[in-house]
Image: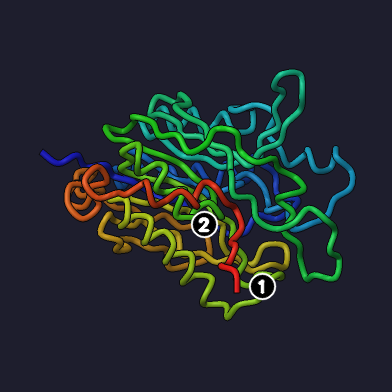
Amino acid sequence: MSRILPVGVAQLGPIARNESRQSVVERMLDLLAQADERGCQLLVYPELALTTFFPRWYIEEQAEVDAFFEHSMPNPDVQPLFDEAARRGIGFHLGYAELCEEDGHTHRYNTAILVSPAGEIIGKYRKIHLPGHADNRPEKAFQHLEKRYFEIGTYGFPVWRAFDGILGMCICNDRRWPETYRVMGLQGVEMVVLGYNTPAISPDSPEIPNLQLFHNHLSMQAGAYQNGCWVAAAAKAGWEEGVEHIGGSCIIAPTGQIVAQALTEADELISYHCDLDLGKHFTQTTFNFAAHRRIEHYGLITERTGAIPPAK
């Protein structure tokens, strides 16, 4: 018998800088209620879901920066989401800015958690592929300062047995890197859940606007197909504090096909009944890693970061 997991993806529209967490959580609770009506057992929220995307600003006062971070999870602002999700028996994925004390030092990460239908945290992931820059570039229309505000994640790409399957997490820019999916694929991942905040046009490498949405889907569809897994991705979308963010929240099958996609750039729920056994066709044939991978030829992947062309 197939293992069917009804999954919802909760896209969020813009969050203003002065919008309270309580207000954002109310919006998230509304999407949770919609997910319950559709019978979802897992709901995916975006990256940095509780606040505006603050890395667009160069902020010098650390206390001002830290106001965007969560010092514990859950906390009083987010507890209503945990409580209501547990009452309804729905698990969820949540992205947020994490401030923590470890080994006597303060750390700040771009973090996501996976929460069980009982309201218990199953797993935590910290973003590894931090985009942008750390220096102030005031000449830009907006900035992308994740390298200033966050540290590189410390957990690698783990997976967890949950929701009658094997699930993994990544965050935003991670989705563009094939290594992200492959490391989880080598652990038998059956579904990758993630959130993203992606501007329609990058200030550092301007593109035709529709290419951002195309590349967004392209990278996730490739990751799903090449690893025989589902991908469920939630966007923060729309015009937020003067910056347009793509929507395109989606659910992608192991075939690489998009089976559900958001139509707006506002708060919107999409859903699909995902057959977690569907990926077996690929992981047992074309992408049977044990039969076909040739790791003796892949050394450069872990030996180098930058490209080195052959000598002339």
- What residue is pinned by disc 1? 205
Quadrant where the image shows the N terminus = top left
* Other-residue count near label 1 (Cα within 10 Å), few / some / many at <14 / 14–19 / ≥20: few
State the residue at coordinates (71%, 38%).
69
What amino acid is at disc 1?
Ser
**Residue 60 vertical placement versus 308 (above, below):** above
Question: Which residue lies most toward the bottom here?
Answer: 208
What amino acid is at disc 2?
Ala
State the residue at coordinates (65%, 76%).
206
Question: Which residue lies most toward the front here?
Answer: 312
- What residue is pinned by disc 2? 235
State the residue at coordinates (19%, 39%).
3
Residue 61 image label = none
Marks 2 and 1, the one that precedes in the sequence = 1
Q: Position of residue 119 (x, y in %)?
A: 45, 26
Give the side of residue 94 with respect to residue 227, left or right.
Answer: right
Rendering colour mode = rainbow
Give the side of residue 16 with respect to residue 14, left or right.
Answer: right
Q: Quadrant of residue 140?
A: bottom right
- Looking at the picture, tell me which residue is in the foreground, 103 or 162: 103
Does the image show residue 194?
A: yes
Q: Position of residue 90 (x, y in %)?
A: 37, 35
Secondary element type, mark 2:
strand
Give the side of residue 26 with respect to residue 118, left or right.
Answer: right
**Residue 150 vertical placement versus 310 (above, below):** above
